[in-house]
Image: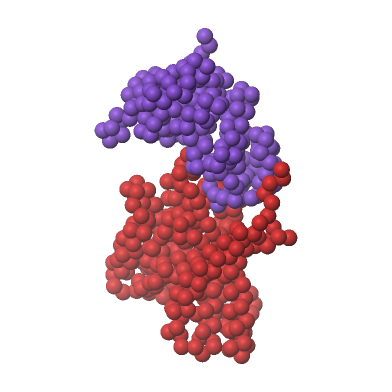
């Protein structure tokens, strides 16, 4: 068996006295599409927030490609190649597509101490290319993200993550609040990731979405993993029962 | 073409820019041509940089999603501390440096307390409004310091730069600073972070932007600009009074809002803040020139503020509702 691309060992997290994560150990193989399911409060989001750097674990280790890593903030997580797509789709509606694609990681013409002049042409050109790469066709990178539909926004978020060569893409309920048509588009994006060799963790409480695009299902309940099986060996009924 | 109209409608400063042109024309007619005479333009240009500099800082801070009520007090504090230090024998430029550092420190405290204790900046800076004003009175010792004309190089800030005596150095200072802040906001990565922080904080945080530090930096810029504006006013009048700038904080907010900056953050432009500040000055002056009772000035600014916000929201909705293709397939 190869080294897992991402591994957690005995992760614990308390939120002001609530034991939200009770020793989660999880291995994700390279190129795998993992579906993470569970009811509200099961600990899915806590686990994801730790991997994406929004929170820190109180106990336990995270390994990336077999090496122990310390994820202190979102920047650390992105530097390690973990990109997270949130249900509210981490985009600023009042900013343009190209600015959103590069927000926090702007290409600069020149800079002093990390501050500098934006390379706006590169931002436009690269965002057009990144968006086309995920098979999304938008007319202008200067349109405001607020003018896009929910599915298009998730498409841009995925394009952004792909552009920055993510190794692991975490999709935290990306299909929430989307119409049926848009949802299938997003599921299409996720399937596309596998073809490009990107490992993905897809979080949802909609079983059908997870079963539609994942190789393996991990179910969580009350802060623990209660089921971990390949899609072919389980069913929606079995997973539902465990939750 | 439709796309251009759509973009123009969504520009928040558009409505106020049109209003500005209209009012200038109106006042010019009502005052029988005095409004745009050399003497009157000189008067407007003398006062404008002072209000507008404070408005630029407040606009930047509001785009970042925060608010500063202490600018009026800082407006008085910096010139007072510069004057007191100069009278005490400090070289003028060293005193200026100390004054700028003091303003930066106040901005830092405003920002740090707001971020660290997660309280609304409305409260932090309301507190600072009182504290900075009190400090101004205390360091003045109750008597305005006396600086003889020529003792400080005030010409660098307020001397006339053209032969005709219309444009003061303060206009140049203000234009240069406004252009720099505007470029900072639109052309740099820092500006992108400011907009993201004010536009949607969770997204900014998720993308690893140091939002707290970005906000603190904006608080500091805001305070320094307010202090500079007050210093320019004091040098122009050659009198250092502890009472200047009272009510300025709300005028600066009004200027930003009239220019299309949203109270919620994320929306706005420096140009908008400038147009707003100019509108306020034009109304103030134009009403006098047109022989309207000057006590209506605040009424007009108030009405304009409400009108601008309602009007901008309406224009933006119209702009957004205009259908243009975003899809190619």
x%, y% of residue B62? 47, 58
Q: Which residue is drawn at 60% across and 24% down?
A: A194
Residue B72 in view, yes or no: yes
Decide: is B283 above or below B185. Answer: below
Q: Tell me where residue A9 appears, x and y as whole percent.
A: 39, 18
The answer to whether A85 is drawn above or below residue B82 in the figure is: above
Colour theme: by chain
Measured along the vertical axis of the image, is residue B260 above or below residue A82?
A: below
Residue beneath the point at 60% across and 47% down: A148
| Residue nearer the viewer, B127 or B88 | B127
Residue depicted at x 48% and y 52%: B198
- The C terminus of chain B appears in which quarter of the rendering? top right
* Left or right placement of residue B272 versus residue B54 in this view: right
Q: In which quarter of the image is the N terminus of chain B?
A: bottom right
Q: Chain in red? A: B
- Kindly indicate the quadrant of the structure image that contains residue A53: top left
Residue B70 coordinates in the image, percent (x, y) = 38, 63
What is the x, y in percent for residue A11? 36, 23
Q: Which of A27 and A61 is in front in this view?
A: A27
Q: Can residue B148 be seen at all in this image of the molecule?
A: no
Query: Image quadrant of residue A183?
Result: top right
Q: The purple chain is which one?
A: A
Looking at the image, the residue that sits furthest to the top is A1
């Amino acid at each position: 068996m190869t080294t897992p691309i991402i591994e957690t060992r005995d992760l614990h997290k308390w939120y002001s006295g609530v034991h939200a994560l009770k020793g989660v150990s999880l291995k994700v193989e390279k190129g795998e599409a993992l579906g993470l399911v569970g009811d509200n409060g099961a600990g899915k989001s806590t686990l994801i927030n730790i991997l994406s750097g929004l929170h820190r674990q109180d106990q336990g280790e995270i390994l990336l490609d077999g090496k122990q890593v310390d994820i202190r903030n979102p920047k650390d997580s992105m530097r390690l190649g973990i990109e997270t797509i949130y249900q509210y789709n981490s985009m600023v509606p009042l900013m343009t597509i190209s600015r959103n694609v590069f927000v926090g990681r702007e290409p600069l013409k020149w800079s002093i101490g990390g501050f500098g002049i934006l390379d706006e042409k590169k931002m436009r050109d690269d965002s057009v290319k990144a968006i086309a790469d995920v098979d999304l066709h938008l007319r202008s990178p200067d349109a405001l993200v607020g003018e896009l539909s929910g599915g298009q926004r998730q498409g841009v978020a995925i394009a952004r993550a792909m552009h920055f060569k993510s190794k692991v893409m975490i999709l935290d309920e990306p299909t929430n609040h989307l119409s049926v048509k848009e949802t299938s588009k997003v599921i299409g994006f996720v399937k596309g990731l596998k073809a490009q060799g990107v490992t993905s963790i897809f979080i949802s409480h909609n079983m059908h979405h997870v079963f539609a695009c994942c190789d393996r299902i991990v179910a969580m309940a009350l802060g623990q993993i209660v089921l971990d099986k390949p899609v072919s060996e389980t069913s929606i009924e079995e997973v539902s029962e465990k939750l | 073409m439709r796309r251009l109209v759509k973009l123009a409608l969504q520009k928040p400063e558009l409505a106020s820019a049109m209003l500005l042109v209209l009012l200038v024309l109106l006042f010019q007619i009502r005052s029988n041509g005095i409004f745009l005479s050399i003497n009157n333009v000189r008067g407007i240009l003398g006062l404008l940089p002072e209000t507008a500099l404070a408005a630029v800082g407040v606009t930047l801070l509001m785009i970042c999603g925060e608010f500063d009520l202490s600018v009026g007090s800082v407006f008085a504090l910096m010139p007072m501390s510069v004057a007191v230090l100069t009278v005490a024998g400090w070289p003028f430029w060293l005193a200026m440096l100390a004054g700028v550092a003091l303003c930066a420190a106040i901005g830092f405290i405003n920002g740090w307390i707001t971020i660290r204790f997660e309280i609304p900046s409305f409260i932090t800076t309301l507190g600072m409004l009182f504290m900075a004003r009190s400090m101004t009175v205390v360091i003045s010792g109750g008597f305005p310091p006396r600086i003889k004309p020529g003792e400080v190089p005030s010409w660098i800030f307020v001397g006339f730069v053209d032969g005709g005596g219309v444009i003061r150095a303060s206009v140049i200072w203000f234009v240069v600073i406004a252009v720099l802040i505007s470029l900072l906001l639109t052309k740099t990565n820092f500006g992108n972070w400011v907009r993201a922080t004010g536009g949607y904080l969770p997204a900014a945080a998720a993308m690893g932007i140091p939002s707290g530090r970005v906000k603190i930096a904006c608080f500091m810029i805001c305070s320094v600009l307010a202090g500079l504006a007050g210093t320019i006013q004091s040098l122009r009048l050659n009198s250092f009074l502890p009472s200047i700038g009272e009510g300025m904080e709300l005028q600066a907010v009004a200027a930003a809002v009239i220019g299309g900056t949203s109270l919620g953050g994320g929306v706005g432009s420096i140009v908008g803040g400038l147009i707003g500040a100019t509108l306020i000055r034009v109304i103030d002056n134009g009403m006098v020139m047109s022989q309207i009772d000057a006590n209506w000035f605040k009424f007009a600014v108030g009405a304009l503020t409400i009108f601008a916000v309602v009007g901008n929201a309406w224009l933006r909705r119209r702009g957004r509702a205009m259908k243009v293709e975003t899809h190619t397939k």
